[in-house]
Image (cartoon, helix red, strand yellow):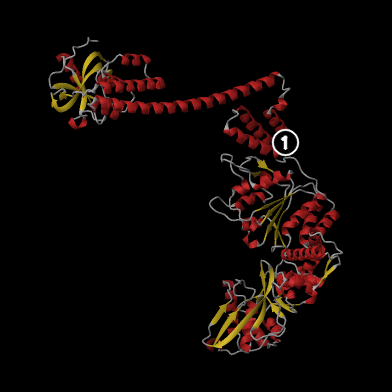
Amino acid sequence: MTDRNSANSATGDYLPLLPLKDMVVFPRMVVPLLVGRPASLMAVEDSLTSGRSLFLCAQRDATIESPGRDDLRNVGTVASILQTLRMPDGSLKIIVEGMARAELRRLVDRGNFVEAGISRVEELPPSEPDAIAAMRLVLTQFEGYVRLSQRVAPEVVVSLRNIEEAGPLADLICAHLPLRVEERQELLEIESVQTRLERITSILIREQDLLEIERKVRERVREQMERGQREYYLHEQLKAIHQELGNREEGSDEYAELKKQIEKAQMPDEVREKAVREFGRYERMPAMSPEGSVIRTYLEWLIDMPWAKRTRDALDLGTAKRVLDEDHYGLSKVKERILEFLAVRKLSKSTRGPILCLVGPPGVGKTSLGQSVARAMGRKFVRISLGGVRDEAEIRGHRRTYIGALPGRIVQGIKKAGVKNPVFMLDEVDKMSMDFRGDPSSALLEVLDPEQNKMFSDHYLEVDLDLREVFFITTANSEYDIPPALHDRMELVRLSGYSTYEKERIAQLYLIPKQMKECGLKLRQLHFTGEAIRTMIQRYTREAGVRELERQIANICRKVAKRLVTRGRVRKVNLDERQVLELLGPEEYSEMRAEVEPKVGVAVGLAWTMAGGDILHIETSTTKGKGILTLTGQLGEVMKESAHAAYTYLRAHAKELRISPTFYRNMDLHVHVPEGAIPKDGPSAGVGIAVSMLSALRNRPPKALLAMTGEITLRGRILPVGGVKEKVLAAHRAGIKEVILPKENQKDLTEVPSEVREELKLLPVSTMEEVLRQTFSDKHPKSESAQSR
């Protein structure tokens, strides 16, 4: 250490320059500095040897090692060196005291260091009253700042009160404020003491506001921490008290209650290990921990799952058959399959449930059949609808990392049933879709695979769930919309539409008693005649099922109930056709009936739709032209191809069919299928189109009350088609007497009700020759037959 140098008054214009990085020194401010740059070290050495003061000036950019004039601020501080200390690395640690402000004019390079040409900055003192007021205000604000910040010793305030001049007071207060370099330089450059005091006052007010906000935030955080620590401490004390009391009060402890429930849940070993491990985590967590509620919800799901609960199957086949017959008319295939399952269960200890898929048009009783199956077997029934489901998590659940995560709908359904062997119906399995969130039908593959569902994994539960005992029943309107992989895992049971006779029986046995009971009507008050039921079926409904028929029956029951109440009428109402028309109003559907008188160019085809079967009137008209074939009626591509195949067959066999061999050159054909707003497609209309074309070309009508279906090839072969039962029922409803169908579809006629087969003449054919023989009573020569084959 060296003694303090004499503080020269710096009367000269040039002083050794000491550039400062990120620092501003005020007059009367004592501060330590670490000097390491060679030029700065030489400047300090010159100051020490010559006894001159230093000029301290802040750099504009702290990264510059050798600053020039433009790199330095305009105003700096003349300072004297109080003490020096040499460091082992060759640098100097000095303590300086600011003396006065000075303005930098120029720089002079002295070789080893730089001298600064400066001029003193004379302060502009304030007037006496203004100075006193400003000093008092600044001191008051500074005291508040010191009280809030606790960064400045209180003794500093006492020493500042003894200063009587405004300039030194302002500079010393600036030395104790944590300001940015730009703000400190701004205060250093202010010549007016009054302006400087006002600026310091505004800075102190700002700093006090910020300190007040910091204090409030700090207190709020401390309160939250103290509350959490207090709750944790009390919780630990409560646990220790229970342990000391030998768990005599454990019943009131939610942790002990949860542990009891885990032990009583009869979980499999792997699941129980998982539950115990999660319970241990939950027990160690603070009460206010957000993850604690997540783990508790998870444990409650594991506890509520029916791991070992099951219902005993009612294995009495007679009782089961009676229950099924009470709820549904017909549907013999499904009923037979249920009885087979019960018989196997009675003989075998296997608990594996079947996976059935009921496919059929709307309203035939697929969904309600599931409830009947559960009632017949004595099992719980659960149903979920998959229509519109497009997220895989709907089936498998969400992982617990997501907020609000829940298990999938399979697990939710099992929990809702409360047993592990319910009858589980997955409704509308053909109406699922997929998007960026996944494919739910792929997630169902594991659920509906008997070899995989014994270890079904839900993303939320994260444990294996055995679904082998669940009796899964799925429903669909169209088997073609079911994904192939899913289709392969299910046993399909096809439900076709009801005939008029079946609908009439269903109405008499089920629908009318149900709706009369709901409307409060007695058997002595209302009676539906068979004529009235047939009128509703044929003129007010057009469906494969009986849903709309039930609505019409309910409509009549309500109107009769209103009439009985308003008129006080007690005499029994025998409902006939006239009264049905009176109560239900104008007919909603004109019955599609076959024409008794045949027309040239018109053939009756048969179609299958989602709502059942229907008849098609296929019309063909001929005009002079160039052999153009026109197809209208919103026909699909497959149906158009069938029309072209029929057209080509007629051209190839024109001579044998006794039509003009050159008709395709000078005659245009226009084939139209009425009800053009309805799309139509499929190959089964090929035979009907061929007959319609031939009728128009011959100018001869086909046989009356005759309908036909079948796919035609270029060689005249008739190939099998689908939906035979629905088509035959549609022909029967329309008053058709004879139906031509492919010979290979004879096996499907066993599904047609016997009363319909007795009233219709079914004509199986395998070639177009046989079709024409039945349609026009043609008798072809043997050569013609051979050529056709």
Secondary structure of residue under mark 1: loop
Quarter of the rendering containing residue 587: bottom right
Position of the N terminus, as image quadrant, is top left
Q: Position of residue 33 (x, y in %)?
A: 27, 19
Near-viewer residue (244 or 52): 52
Q: Nearer the viewer, residue 217 or 434?
A: 217
Q: Amino acid at mark 1?
A: Ala
Is 426 located above or below residue 656 in the figure?
above
Which residue is located at x 66 percent, y 47 percent? 410
**587 with respect to 525 (left or right):** left
Above or below for 406 versus 606? above
- Percent x, y for residue 20? 24, 25
Q: Nearer the viewer, residue 74 or 659?
A: 74
> Viewed as shown, does residue 121 lie left or right of 688?
left
Q: Is residue 533 left or right of residue 654?
A: right
Which residue is located at x 60 percent, y 42 percent?
405
**Residue 401 visible within the image:** yes
Q: Quadrant of the C terminus?
A: bottom right
Q: Residue 379 at x, y = what percent? A: 78, 48
Instruction: Say which of 555 and 68 sits in front.
Output: 555
Q: Which residue is mark 1?
A: 265
Where 139 sits versus 379, above or below? above
- Tell whether 585 sits left or right of 224: right
Query: As drawn, which residue projects farthest toward the front?
Result: 129
Is residue 328 visible to us here?
no
Q: Where's residue 92, x and y in %? A: 25, 17
